[in-house]
């Protein structure tokens, strides 16, 4: 055993609007010998996710806010380098929530041993094999009750959840899958690589008009990662009995003023629409079934994925901001380099 | 048999914003001898309902728009005075959709024979025994999945649907029922007569503040007849897993501009809320069960009701406008005087 220095990113102050360089600070923490039951994990990848912006506010939500002056928590994957626990041996790959640090040393019960994924990096446990993929699956099935043949619209379709959602919708029998993204390159990826039947760049023209053009038969399921004009456009295109999974509203997370909602919510009455918000903690009972399905799909070569990888734990805040601004294709992760 | 003159109110032009005296015209139609299969019905009461405003627009919706230059359709109850049908005999009380006229003469298949309600007028078939009561029942059960002990908030609680909703919620086991209305008199009726635990006048102070005061433990089910600031206030008070039945948005039916939606729809994500719009045509399979329950409750003296009765078929347009402005307590009906 030996001491180790862990580089960690902490929440220094709560941001108003967009986080700045003052929001975070990087510190070094020295870990000594393991206490009984602890393990030491060298992280390979840590995750940056849109939901983290909400946790930076001091507001009661489905998860408590990040603690000020403490290391940012969140998904991370690594390998055990020392262990004082029989359950989590040295060499094991582990998934955990200790977040933005290159080395984690904590009680073994906070680490989940995960199998290697043949031919793929551990970072997929932060993406399509992890909460990202599960979010797509749960939103389509348990929340939006996807039926075979449905037309599905996904906003923010080139993001981590969106790239998973289009593929899973297709594999579950959707009739037509369309998506929006914020650049021509992303739009091309959606149709060329991620199985979308059509896609558009929401910066090119009003979403209302573009969505109408790609959904001649309307929309049955809308998986919303964006909110704002996307939700409004979808409400106009929803078919009777349509279902909307409200997964997020990244367009508004850094707003400092309250943003008016869609001006056509009355369509929900006349068309019998359901809108349902969700977050994963209520749906973890779907995780096992999802992992089975995804393992099968992945082994069969049915799943494409991209990652946007940023190197260096100290660059995690910048990676987070880039992701919030749409600078990623697929899952944004930070390779710790530890 | 003899000819009869029927006074009828027709849609003369489609209104922009609030209907005016030019929107409707009153005409006299002479009916001659019955054709085979027809019946002649003298209406006792005709119904004016908020949903009718939507049908005055030339917009595709769950029911087709009213035809221009034709008699306004809608709920009505009356008695058969002549019959050329074995199924619908002279003297029978009938419920039908031939709307704003004092005498209807049509094919018997358009009339439903209904039993007398002991000690109550036929107009209840336009109110708590009819689609109004069914709307309340379906919204609470099939749409909002009411659970025993839930706190229920009803907007527009002194209206036809609202007075039924509070009582039905209580009878189905709600833990606490609160409502909003637009005058001190209505607020008093809600708590004194309709079983509401608390109520407030939405004109007295912001709904957000008043709702908070009467729901110390938050809201589990919101039955929304109003929209606008009521929906916004409710979204702030909803408990995790809460359900919102979107029944109508009477505050906006006469708007000529699109109205921004609630500024806090993001709460639906973090709290896992469901919002579901509904209209009755999709839920008619609940009608039989509802009629059984309501018959039992009514016979047991568990149901209070008020009607606001306007006399004279020619006053139906004014009754409709008064109802849209909140000039009614309970169900607004027109007594034809025929």
Image: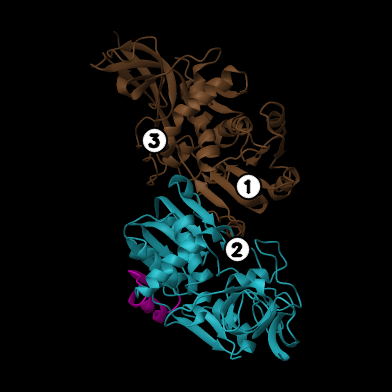
Chain colours: A brown, B cyan
Q: Answer yes or no: are tags 1 and 3 on the same subunit.
A: yes
Label 1 CA crowd tier, 10 Å (few <14, some 14–19, many 20+): many
Looking at the rendering, which quadrant does residue A328 occupy? top right
- Asked whether the beta carbons under mark 1 and mark 2 sit within 8 Å of each other, the answer is no
The reply to whether the magenta stretch includes residue A84 is no
Residue A333 at least partly seen: no
- Asked whether the beta carbons under mark 1 and mark 3 sit within 8 Å of each other, the answer is no
Q: Position of residue A176 (x, y in %)?
A: 69, 38
Judging depth in this view, the residue of A334 and B327 nearest the camera is: B327
Separation (CA) of disc 1 from disc 3: 33 Å
Looking at the image, residue A217 lies above or below residue B44: above
**Which chain letter matches label 2?**
B
Q: Residue at x 42, y 30 (%)?
A: A74
Q: Which residues are magenta?
A: B182-199
| Left or right: where B33 falls relative to B257 | right
**Residue farthest to the front?**
B86
Mark 3 = which residue?
A12
Looking at the rendering, which quadrant does residue B318 occupy? bottom right
Q: Position of residue B244 (x, y in %)?
A: 47, 56
Q: Quadrant of the C terminus of chain B?
A: bottom right
**Which chain letter matches label 3?**
A
Separation (CA) of disc 1 from disc 2: 17 Å
Mark 2 = which residue?
B259
**Residue farthest to the top?**
A1
Circle number at residue A230: 1
Q: Residue at x 53, y 12 (%)?
A: A118
Looking at the rendering, which quadrant does residue B98 occupy? bottom right
Kind of element beneath mark 2? loop
């Amino acid at each position: 055993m030996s001491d180790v220095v862990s580089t960690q990113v902490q929440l220094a102050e709560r941001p108003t609007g967009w986080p700045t360089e003052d929001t975070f600070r990087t510190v070094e923490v020295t870990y000594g010998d393991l206490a009984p039951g602890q393990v030491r994990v060298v992280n390979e990848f840590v995750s940056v996710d849109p939901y983290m912006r909400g946790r930076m506010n001091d507001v009661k939500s489905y998860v408590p806010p990040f603690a000020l002056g403490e290391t940012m928590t969140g998904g991370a994957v690594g390998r055990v380098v020392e262990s004082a626990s029989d359950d989590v041996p040295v060499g094991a790959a582990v998934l955990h929530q200790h977040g933005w640090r290159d080395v984690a040393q904590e009680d073994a019960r906070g680490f989940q041993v995960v199998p290697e994924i043949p031919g793929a990096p551990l970072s997929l446990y932060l993406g399509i094999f992890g909460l990202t993929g599960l979010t797509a699956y749960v939103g389509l099935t348990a929340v939006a009750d996807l039926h075979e043949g449905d037309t599905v619209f996904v906003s923010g379709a080139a993001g981590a959840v969106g790239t998973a959602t289009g593929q899973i919708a297709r594999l579950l029998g959707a009739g037509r899958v369309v998506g929006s993204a914020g650049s021509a390159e992303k739009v091309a990826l959606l149709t060329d690589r991620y199985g979308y039947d059509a896609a558009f760049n929401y910066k090119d023209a009003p979403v209302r008009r573009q969505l109408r053009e790609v959904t001649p038969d309307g929309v049955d399921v809308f998986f919303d990662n964006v909110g704002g004009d996307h939700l409004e456009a979808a409400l106009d295109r929803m078919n009777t009995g349509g279902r909307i999974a409200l997964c997020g509203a990244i367009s508004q997370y850094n707003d400092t003023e309250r943003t008016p909602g869609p001006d056509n919510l009355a369509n929900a009455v006349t068309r019998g629409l359901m809108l349902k918000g969700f977050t994963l903690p209520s749906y973890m009972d779907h995780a096992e079934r999802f992992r089975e399905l995804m393992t099968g799909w992945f082994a069969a070569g049915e799943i494409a994925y991209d990652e946007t990888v940023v190197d260096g734990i100290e660059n995690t805040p910048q990676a987070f901001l880039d992701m919030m601004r749409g600078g990623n294709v697929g899952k944004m992760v930070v390779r710790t380099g530890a």
